Amino acid sequence: MESLLQLAIIWASVFIANIFAEKTRLTPVLFFLFMGALLVNTGILPQKTDEFIRVFAELGIIVIMFALGFEENTSDFLKSIKRSWGIALFGALAPFFTAYLIAGYFWENQNIAIMCGLAMTATAVSLTMVSLKSEGLHRSQAAKGIMTSAILDDVASLVFVAILVPIATGATMVSLPGIGLIVLKALLFFMVIAAVGMWILPERPNGMLSLIPGFGRHGVRHILSIGKGENTTLTVLTVAVLAGLLSHLFGFHAAVGAYMAGLILKEEYFQIVATPNINHYENTKKILDNVAFSWIGPVFFVVLGTHIVLEWDILVAVIPQTLVLAFALLVAQIASAGLAARYTAGFDYAQSVMVGIGMLGRAELAFVVMDIAYVQFGILNDEAFYTLMGTALILNIAVPVGIVLWKPYFSRSEEKQAREG
């Protein structure tokens, strides 16, 4: 019953957060994070997350990312990769070296500097995309650029983790075969997802699969048609979880696989002959949005906020380091990603700044790296750990606030392009 009590407390905090968000006109994500930090630091929620709540929160981020991918068009995503390579590259290098140099200056320890740089590299794409959705901007070209760049950053960050963590812990030296294995796994994962989308899901599977008796005549539309479309939500959620598990098997966060699963499910698959008057795609999308953004998804952000456990004596001592690092990363991230968006991706000024703001968040991978460096191996000292925690909090708050503040300029730019186009 303890787990259910914690879930009830979290849902009550989500309700309160939504009220504050409505009153202040800020995105609910900001208040979800705040409520998590408040609950854990007042002792209402334990510092060690209950296993049931942890899994529930993990399901939340899987459903969130699947719902976001479900709205996207596969061809648009592939085109966005060609456009967003510069944002991903420079948007990752700038924060890494900024954090590395500042941490090296403060603590004069190369291993601490490496881990600080690594923790501040990957973008919290889920935080940004939910913030954009709450402002009605998640279908914009800038949002697609952020999403694609952040996924590419996650892949690159996993390579960095594989290379730099063993170096910082002294466990091994750089190994070309080890690097090659990580890159191969990344390529293989995306090839598997692409193969599923191209050859297995269509109404009539393509390639060698079309030669298999029975299977070659039935694609995903036939599965969705079972029960006259009554099981569409169950089917797609199963696909989302399986894709998340596949992503985890390849060493990535489950959310990446869930997003890719949503991406390869096309609207035409939901055109069921037996019920031509029912829009099963829109009905499924409505249910997914409700699950993702109203009652399961928010649990992830509240639990994320519970990672911010404050010890006030250390916290006060590292205020200068936290402010310096957060400000430097804010400037470096917006400048690097924004300039890359402007000059390598062809976005206009307002869109480029929005891309830079959208790349500020730090969440899943940042906390994984902190856990490895502070809890498992003791590389980070207390001051460095709390500096990173405070910096991540500031950057996460900056995302929804920055999006809200920049939205008027961004919207005017979008309207101008729509008139001209």
Image: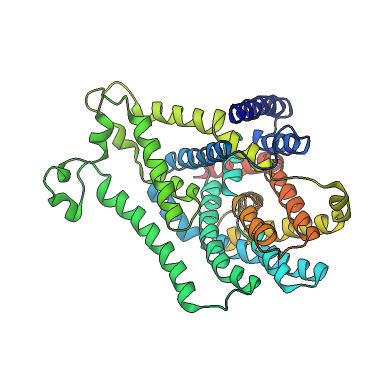
Q: Quadrant of the N terminus?
A: top right
268 or 177, which lies in front? 177
Tell me where residue 155 appears, x and y as whole percent: 51, 60
Tell me where residue 417 appears, x and y as whole percent: 55, 45
Tell me where residue 288 appears, x and y as whole percent: 46, 31
Tell me where residue 293 appears, x and y as whole percent: 55, 32
Q: How is the image coloured?
A: rainbow
Q: Residue at the location (72% across, 27% down)?
A: 20
Direction front: furthest residue:
1
Quadrant assignment, res 280: top left
Q: Is residue 97 above or below residue 358?
A: below
Q: Residue at the location (34% across, 30% down)?
A: 232
Q: Residue at the location (48% across, 38% down)?
A: 63
378 or 211, which lies in front? 378
Q: Is residue 412 visible?
A: no
Q: Is residue 143 visible?
A: yes
Q: Residue at the location (29% across, 37% down)?
A: 269
Q: How many numbered discs sit on the rendered protein?
A: 0
364 or 98, which lies in front? 364
205 or 81, which lies in front? 205
